[in-house]
């Protein structure tokens, strides 16, 4: 089954966010990433199932739903792989956008002779 850019982007954003703040709650993570709480929970569980993230209670309190999320060595490796693919795709998108901007500038210059930005 081929991966979609959304799947890769979501994994990339989740792994990066969890690496940056292992204490983040799922609610805060869902707000930060613009995902529903249910989708955030589903995605985190998938990362745990793949062995890329380890979750454990970080406080002994009545709030048993609070976890510390740690990237495993496999998760760190996967994050590096995804980051490389994400960066490559963003560079390609940037180059395509720069080419489109140049084509639009040429159209304006050859057309009405208006001043081009």
Image (cartoon, grey):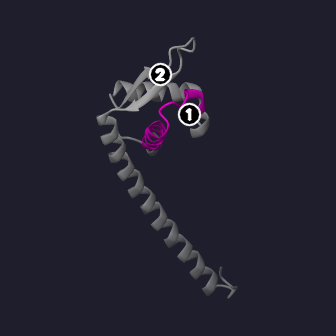
Q: Nearer the viewer, residue 111 or 44?
A: 44
Magenta region, residue range = 8-29
Task: Examine the rendering and report whether any part of residue 1 can be seen.
Answer: no
The verdict on residue 13 being magenta is yes
- Quadrant housing the N terminus: top left
Q: Nearer the viewer, residue 92 or 104?
A: 92
* Majority secondary structure of magenta residues: helix
Q: Is 59 situated above or below 39? A: above
Q: Mark 2 falls on what kind of element?
A: loop
Packing grade of label 2 (10 A; few <14, some 14-19, many >=20) is: some
Q: Nearer the viewer, residue 56 or 29?
A: 56
Residue drawn 46% across and 26% down?
68
Residue drawn 59% across and 30% down?
36
Sooner in the amino-acid sequence: mark 2 or mark 1: 1
For disc 1, the marked residue is 29
- Quadrant housing the C terminus: bottom right
Q: Mark 1 falls on what kind of element?
A: helix
């Amino acid at each position: 089954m081929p991966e979609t850019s959304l799947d890769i982007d979501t994994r990339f954003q989740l792994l990066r966010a969890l690496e940056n703040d292992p204490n983040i709650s799922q609610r805060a993570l869902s707000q930060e990433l613009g995902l529903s709480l249910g989708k955030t929970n589903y995605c985190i569980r998938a990362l745990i199932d793949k062995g890329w993230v380890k979750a454990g209670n970080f406080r002994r309190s009545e709030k048993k739903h609070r976890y510390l999320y740690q990237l495993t060595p496999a998760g760190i490796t996967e994050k590096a792989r995804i980051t490389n693919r994400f960066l490559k795709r963003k560079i390609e998108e940037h180059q395509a956008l720069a080419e489109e901007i140049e084509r639009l500038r040429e159209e304006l210059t050859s057309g009405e002779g208006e001043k081009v930005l």
